[in-house]
Image (cartoon, rainbow, N blue to C red):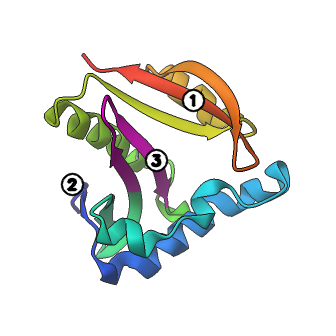
Amino acid sequence: MSDDPRLATMEDCPAVEAIVKAAYSHYVPRIGREPGPMRDNYATLIQDGRVHVVERDGAVAGLLVLIPEQETLLLDNVAVAPAAQETGLGRKLLEFAERTARDAGYRSIRLYTNEAMTENIALYSRIGYVETHRGEETGLRRVYMTKILG
């Protein structure tokens, strides 16, 4: 079993889309609509080299979407298949994102999450992300967070 993320290929796209749907669909009633990650075009993100996946037992079990920006790396999405949740895979993906940011010369990494995803806000706060502001974007109430990399 390898927990080393690799760049996703087009063959991974159906698994990526299925994991995102499974990981985020329970938020639809809370938010009142699909969260942003459920509406992303993963084929384009994969073609652009933005999606990394992790396999367990020969199947994609988790993913993250990283988008380089001028001053920081945007952690656009992290999702783990329900069967692989609570196994440390999400933490490993977050650590990979931070290593990737450092290796690219960034001094910080940023993310945003929906205001209604309070458990995500709490998790990110526990691992060193600091809320910078809140706002509405594409009709979604978002909490923006940044972590300074040591």
Residue neighbourhood size for the residue with mark 1, other residues' Cα within 10 Å, grouped as few (<14), some (14–19), many (≥20): some
The kind of residue tagged 3 is Asp
- Is 26 above or below relative to 100? below
SS for callout 1:
strand
Please indicate whether residue 134 sits to the left or right of residue 104 in the image: right
Q: CA distance from mark 3 to mark 1?
A: 11 Å
- Is 147 above or below relative to 95? above
- Magenta residues? 64-80
Q: Quadrant of the N terminus?
A: bottom left
Residue designated by label 1: 144
Residue neighbourhood size for the residue with mark 3, other residues' Cα within 10 Å, grouped as few (<14), some (14–19), many (≥20): some
Nearest to the observer: residue 70 or residue 117: 70
Q: Position of residue 101 (x, y in %)?
A: 25, 35
- Is 33 above or below relative to 116? below
Q: Which mark is residue 76?
A: 3
- Residue at 41% from the left image edge and 75% from the top image edge: 43
| Mark closer to the chain start, 3 or 1 | 3
- Residue at 57% from the left image edge and 58% from the top image edge: 37
- Chief SS of the magenta region: strand
